[in-house]
Image (cartoon, helix red, strand yellow):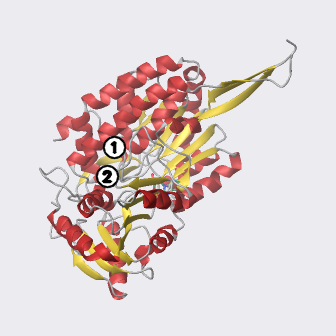
Amino acid sequence: MLQKTSHFMRQANLIGGEWVEADSGATLDVTNPANGQKIGTVPKSGKAETRRAIKAAEKAFHSWKKTSANDRAKLLRKLHDVIMDNQDALAELLTMEQGKSLAEAKGEVAISAAYILWFAEEGRRTYGDVVPSPWADRRILVTKEPVGVIAAITPWNFPSSMLARKIGPALAAGCTSVVKPASQTPYSGLAWGALCEEAGFPKGVVNIVTGSAGEIGDELCTNPLVKKITFTGSTEVGKLLIEKSASTVKKVSMELGGNAPFIVFDDADIDRAVEGAMVAKYRNSGQTCVCTNRFFVQSGVYDQFVDKLAAASKKLKVGAGLDEGTQQGPLIDVKAVEKVEELIGDATSKGARVVTGGKRHELGGSFFEPTVISGATTAMRVMKEEIFGPVAPVFRFDKEEEAVAMANDTEFGLACYFYSGDLGRVFRVTEALKYGMVGVNEGLITTVEAPFGGVKESGLGREGGHQGIDDYLDTKYVCIGGL
Ligand code: ADP
């Protein structure tokens, strides 16, 4: 098994084109969440290594920014091909460190490649403006330039594609980068270094350091050579990074937590809603920031929806991601299982009923049963807190306004979903929901062509779509006088 992945499984930092250990030689262990076994180690780096990686990126920026958009696009297209040529090996590595099923891992690798291809194309379209001048003797131009060195900090739930959405636009725009992957899943991050080498990117354009989140994060946020921080992770850490970046007034883009509502109206196609609910809830074992956290179901279809969702949930095949036919892998670690247990305990102590699941899976470790809870109420912690696990609490409502009010009663505003067959209601509810992304009669909406991102405390900026490259560009206004 390891043979296929070994070429991409790098156990070192990539700084200025060299694969190097931490200065101290210290390492962190990486384990497989499906069996708790050690897969390998990565360097436990800190400030010094990060500073060198930033310097390497700064050095590379001087020549990288001068390449043409077309030349960068060619390299990105090559990168896309290298990823797809190695889709299986990369997916296996991803499953091994992250736990998701191999089918989902292959999907993630494919969407990573798709982001790279998308930005290869978008990089050639970073148009400026020629603005009609109010002065007869002056002309106004507006141009776009790469911001410079960018730093990317990414989470463990999508260790490949969260980097694709950052490295893709950065490279396309002419920026260079320093990347810090999550310590639980560093190999899919480090693999980007090997992939970029194979595609032929110059040394220092992509640098990767693993290790102490606090130390690396501090250096990335406070070093004046870094012009932009892009982060995907918890709202708590995101706020910290924004605060730290204030000292050098960096651009920041943040993809933070969500608390996605999924509303099912009486007039919905219930089978379609259940199908969408299964994806929106259980993808990656419920560990995505756009996973449904709260189901709101109208009284007329409540029992039917709960029964059908429970029946479908029961059928999900739980197992190790690498095992044939697995649909749901383990949670990332036992801490995540404990959080899920706590939230279920809180809900049942306040009157909710477990319809299916509700406990650790017989496979042990961090496996958990797909769970449906009926009778959820706004007094329960699941109303406010991100579950990040395979638990579906179902709330009941009578009126449209009631559902919208409950859906919006959160500091988060990332994705939301609703199902209705009434055209007027579709527009009313879409407009009333305070979210960055709305799925109407759809439970899976992420795609490279569309802008992904949140409002409120779910974040700043957008990834993907034509918007996804904006954050990597500075606008320059040029006034040419004396004509
Ligand atoms: P999660 O709760 O999903 O693990 P986190 O926000 O804790 O999300 O982690 C997301 C990423 O942020 C990871 O790469 C993690 O190592 C990093 N991180 C965590 N704490 C800090 C910090 N204080 N400074 C910088 N990065 C951090």
Estimate how packed mark 2 is, as few (under 14), some (14 to 19) or many (20 or more) residues with alpha carbons within 10 Å: many
Residue at position x 49%, y 72% from top? 401
Estimate how packed mark 1 is, as few (under 14), some (14 to 19) or many (20 or more) residues with alpha carbons within 10 Å: many
Depicted 441 relative to depicted 382: above or below: above
Residue 338 in sight here:
no
Q: Quadrant of the N terminus?
A: top left
Quarter of the rendering containing residue 191: top left
Quarter of the rendering containing residue 455: bottom right
Task: Name the spot of residue 283 as percent of width and height, x first.
Answer: 29, 56
Q: Quadrant of the C terminus?
A: top right
User: Mark 2 — residue?
Assistant: 30
Residue at position x 47%, y 61% from top? 429
Is the C-beta separation of discs 1 and 2 under 8 Å? yes
Depicted 329 relative to depicted 44: above or below: below
Task: Name the spot of residue 69 as percent of width and height, x first.
Answer: 52, 20
In the image, is 468 to the left or to the right of 264? right
| Residue 187, label in figure | 1
Question: Which kind of residue does numbered mark 2 sit on?
Answer: Val
| Residue 341, label in figure | none
Marks 1 and 2, how far apart at CA:
9 Å
- Label 1 beta carbon less than 8 Å to ligand 1: no
In the image, is 313 to the left or to the right of 407? left
Task: Name the spot of residue 208 as percent of width and height, x first.
Answer: 45, 38
Residue 327 in sight here:
yes
**Residue farthest along the left direction in this orientation:** 324
Residue at position x 35%, y 68% from top? 335
